[in-house]
């Protein structure tokens, strides 16, 4: 199994966990039957059916992604749904010329894509995407906002350090600061001359007993994935002490009595964000 395939499976799991927030965010855009939607950075296609649901039965959705294996997985899904006439998926680099005509989209959607370490100048990409909008069309940027989630309730200091370490690991090649930071996405829309720009939050709360998909995601992708890697790569750089490391090992060890996901009152809070604006 390739790395791209592994990532695709994790992305599908993430989409299932985020689905209530994704559905509410898409609903906030006011999609209508017959509209054309572009999913810029669609990955393996997990959000395509939610977007199509808003414009069905006569609308169209185009997905673009730089990963050929992800595009292949997305096309497989489209065929499985029997929606080949309504949804197309193409390989494309968002930082280069795109196979989409200017002023041809009612909505451009981009979820968890526009980060400095993946696209470089996110503001420039937003400006390019904005030119694909019809007059009155909207450009929407969705973020799972993973640096602001709470997966370790009761361990705020430790989680703050881990999130700082995680951001530092991602920012080793391209800094996440100032105008380049994803939390400045509203500024990117305004710089692209979009109007009526808005920010909305769609919080999710999961409590014990955790749904199977949620437990699998926070265990594999967060605790044993992003958090563990951040501690290993950058924990010391952000001030994690020996005591912090000991605490982390205790609450992240499924064999330990303090394992965080086995606590009867465990909960996690996700804080996804949507920013969107309109072309005049």
Image: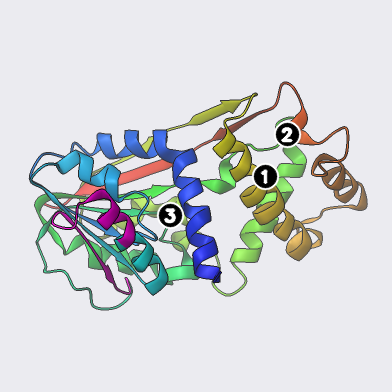
Look at the picture and state if 229 lies above or below 156. below
Mark 3 and mark 2 residues within 8 Å of each other at the beta carbon: no
Q: What's the CA distance linking mark 3 and mark 2?
A: 26 Å
Instruction: Specify which label sits upstream in the sequence, 2 or 1.
Output: 1
Q: What's the CA distance linking mark 1 and mark 3?
A: 20 Å
Q: Is residue 101 left or right of 121 when viewed as pictured? A: left
Query: Number of numbered discs present?
Result: 3
Magenta region includes residue 125:
no
* Label placed on residue 112: 3
Q: Find disc 1 in the rendering and name its residue.
A: 219
Q: Residues within 10 Å of mark 3 (few under 14, many from 20)?
A: some
Please tell me whether mark 2 sits on a helix, a strand or a loop: helix
Please tell me whether mark 1 sits on a helix, a strand or a loop: helix
Magenta region includes residue 78:
yes
Q: Is residue 81 left or right of 112 when viewed as pictured? A: left
Q: Give percent across and percent down for residue 150.
A: 63, 36
Look at the picture and state if 53 lies above or below 121. above
Residue drawn at x 10%, y 40% as measured from the top left:
33
Which mark lies nearer to you, 1 or 3?
1
Q: Which residues are magenta?
A: 76-94
Which mark lies nearer to you, 3 or 2?
2
Q: What's the CA distance linking mark 2 and mark 1?
A: 8 Å
Residue drawn at x 70%, y 45% as measured from the top left:
160
Q: Find disc 2 in the rendering and name its residue.
A: 261
Instruction: Specify which label sits upstream in the sequence, 3 or 2.
Output: 3
């Amino acid at each position: 199994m390739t790395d791209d395939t592994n990532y695709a499976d994790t992305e599908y799991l993430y989409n299932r966990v985020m689905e209530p927030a994704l559905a509410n965010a898409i609903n906030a855009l006011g999609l209508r039957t017959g509209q054309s939607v572009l999913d810029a950075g669609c990955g393996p296609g997990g959000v395509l059916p939610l977007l199509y649901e808003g414009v069905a039965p006569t609308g169209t959705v185009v997905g673009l992604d730089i990963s050929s294996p992800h595009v292949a997985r997305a096309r497989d899904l489209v065929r499985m749904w029997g929606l080949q006439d309504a949804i197309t998926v193409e390989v494309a680099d968002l930082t280069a010329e795109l196979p989409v005509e200017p002023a041809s989209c009612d909505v451009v959607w981009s979820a968890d894509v526009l980060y400095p370490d993946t696209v470089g100048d996110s503001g420039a990409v937003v400006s390019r995407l904005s030119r694909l909008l019809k007059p009155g069309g909207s450009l929407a940027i969705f973020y799972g906002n993973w640096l602001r989630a709470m997966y370790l309730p009761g361990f705020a200091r430790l989680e703050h350090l881990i999130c700082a370490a995680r951001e530092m690991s991602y920012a080793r090649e391209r800094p996440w600061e100032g105008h380049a930071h994803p939390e400045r996405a509203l500024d990117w829309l305004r710089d692209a001359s979009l109007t009526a720009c808005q920010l909305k939050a769609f919080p999710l709360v999961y409590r014990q007993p955790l749904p199977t998909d949620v437990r699998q995601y926070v265990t594999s992708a967060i605790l044993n994935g992003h958090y563990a890697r951040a501690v290993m790569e950058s924990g010391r750089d952000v001030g994690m002490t020996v005591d912090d490391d000991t605490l982390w090992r205790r609450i992240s060890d499924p064999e330990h009595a303090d394992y965080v996901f086995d606590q009867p009152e465990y909960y996690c809070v996700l804080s996804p964000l949507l920013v969107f604006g309109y072309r005049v």
